[in-house]
Image (cartoon, grey):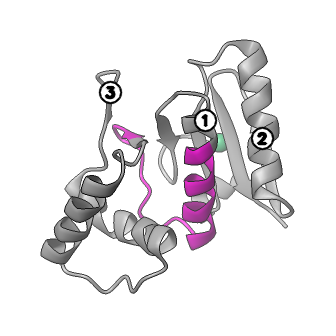
């Protein structure tokens, strides 16, 4: 893992809770301790969730549909042997009116894929997300937005 990447930190616990809710379809009303328990027991059953968040990326405030999209993307990335890294959410500088500012867009790292794999990943993600989502291949990342 690159130095600027890391596991989801404590300050995005609420984002993680949302993600857990998507993964397990259970109530998101859990305390930090309960969350640690869920994560702990989860890790006994399966390999660790292959999601990392780039330092500085803000996921707090993302629309719930984006968490679902991130979960689906994780499956695609895992299938191609890479850890999914969310490189941008509500942070960063995007063009005026960008859906990033509305919590309806994320950027996902793609620079570690060779061009042919990147194309495949883009196509598979587009198919997995279905209608309403735009999946756009940029130079170093894949931009995903919900724009029905
Ligand atoms: Zn973007």
Q: Nearer the viewer, mark 3 or mark 1?
A: 1
Residue 82 colored magenta? no
Residue carrying label 1: 79
Q: Identify the residue at horizontal 59%, vertical 64% (top origin).
A: 68
Q: CA distance from mark 3 to mark 2?
A: 27 Å
Which image quadrant is residue 124 in? top right
Q: Give residue 129's position: percent from left, percent from top.
A: 76, 56
Q: Give residue 110's position: percent from left, percent from top.
A: 61, 26
Residue carrying label 3: 4
> Secondary structure beneath disc 1?
helix
> Secondary structure beneath disc 2?
helix
Position of 97 with respect to 46 (left or right) is: right
Q: Nearer the viewer, mark 3 or mark 2?
A: 2
Residue carrying label 2: 124
Q: Which residues are magenta?
A: 53-75
The answer to whether mark 2 is within 8 Å of ligand 1 is no
Position of 4 with respect to 71 (left or right) is: left
């Amino acid at each position: 893992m690159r130095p600027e990447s890391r596991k989801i930190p404590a300050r995005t616990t609420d984002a993680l809770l949302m993600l857990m809710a998507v993964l397990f379809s259970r109530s998101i009303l859990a305390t930090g301790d309960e969350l640690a328990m869920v994560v702990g027991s989860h890790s006994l059953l399966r390999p660790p969730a292959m999601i990392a968040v780039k330092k500085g990326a803000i996921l707090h405030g993302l629309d719930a549909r984006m968490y679902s999209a991130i979960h689906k993307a994780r499956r695609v990335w895992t299938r191609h042997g890479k850890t999914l890294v969310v490189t941008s959410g509500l942070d960063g500088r995007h063009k005026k009116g960008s859906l990033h500012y509305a919590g309806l867009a994320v950027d996902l790292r793609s620079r570690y894929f060779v061009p042919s794999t990147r194309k495949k990943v883009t196509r598979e993600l587009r198919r997995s997300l279905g209608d309403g989502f735009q999946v756009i291949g940029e130079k170093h990342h894949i931009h995903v937005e919900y724009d029905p």
